[in-house]
Image: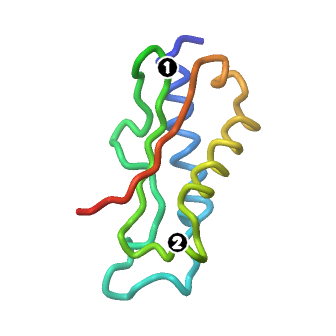
């Protein structure tokens, strides 16, 4: 498996995992005015990129996230743990992730 193949596999898995888990957004946290504002989702179109000889999975969360009840960093780590359990071969490459707030 090439690093590009691993990157694509990680992207596909993370996208599906987030969707299946409804972006880890508790129903009570949704704002009718901004239904996507509280979601944790993979940001980039490619979702994972090859950078500095490794794979970087990028996550962002909306500005409405209630950090006390729903930690985006912990959700991203759960995604990465699920990726490792489902596709350990991806972790043969140096893979990391980042999480930041989308201020758009």
Extreme residue toward the front, this view: 68
Tell me if residue 23 comes above or below residue 64 in the rendering.
above
Q: Nearer the viewer, residue 7 or 63?
A: 63
Mark 2 lies on a secondary structure that is: loop
| Residue drawn 27% across the image and 62% down it | 103
Binning the other alpha carbons within 10 Å of mark 2 as few (below 14), some (14 to 19) or many (20 upward) gives few
Extreme residue toward the right, this view: 85
Q: Is residue 4 left or right of residue 79?
A: left
Q: Is residue 46 left or right of residue 104?
A: right
Determine the CA span between mark 2 and mark 1: 29 Å
Q: Which mark is residue 54?
A: 1
Report x, y in % for residue 60: 41, 54
Q: Which mark is residue 14?
A: none
Extreme residue toward the top, this view: 2
Which of pointers 2 and 1 indicates the residue nearer the eye? 2
Mark 1 lies on a secondary structure that is: strand
Report x, y in % for residue 9: 56, 30
Task: Name the residue beneath numbered marker 2.
Answer: 67
Mark with earlier residue (2, 1): 1
Report x, y in % for residue 38: 44, 72
Tell me if residue 49 comes above or below residue 62 in the rendering.
above
Q: Quadrant of the N terminus?
A: top right
| Residue drawn 33% across the image and 42% down it | 45
Tell me if residue 99 comes above or below residue 51 in the rendering.
below
Number of marks drawn = 2
Q: Quadrant of the C terminus?
A: bottom left
């Amino acid at each position: 498996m090439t690093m590009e193949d691993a990157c694509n596999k990680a992207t596909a898995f993370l996208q599906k995992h987030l969707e299946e888990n409804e972006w880890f957004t508790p129903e009570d946290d949704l704002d009718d005015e901004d239904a996507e504002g509280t979601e944790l989702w993979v940001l980039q179109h490619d979702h994972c990129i090859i950078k500095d000889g490794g794979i970087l999975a990028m996550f962002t969360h909306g500005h409405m996230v209630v950090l006390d009840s729903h930690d985006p960093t912990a959700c991203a780590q759960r995604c990465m743990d699920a990726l490792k359990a489902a596709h350990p071969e991806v972790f043969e490459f140096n893979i990391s992730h980042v999480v930041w707030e989308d201020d758009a």
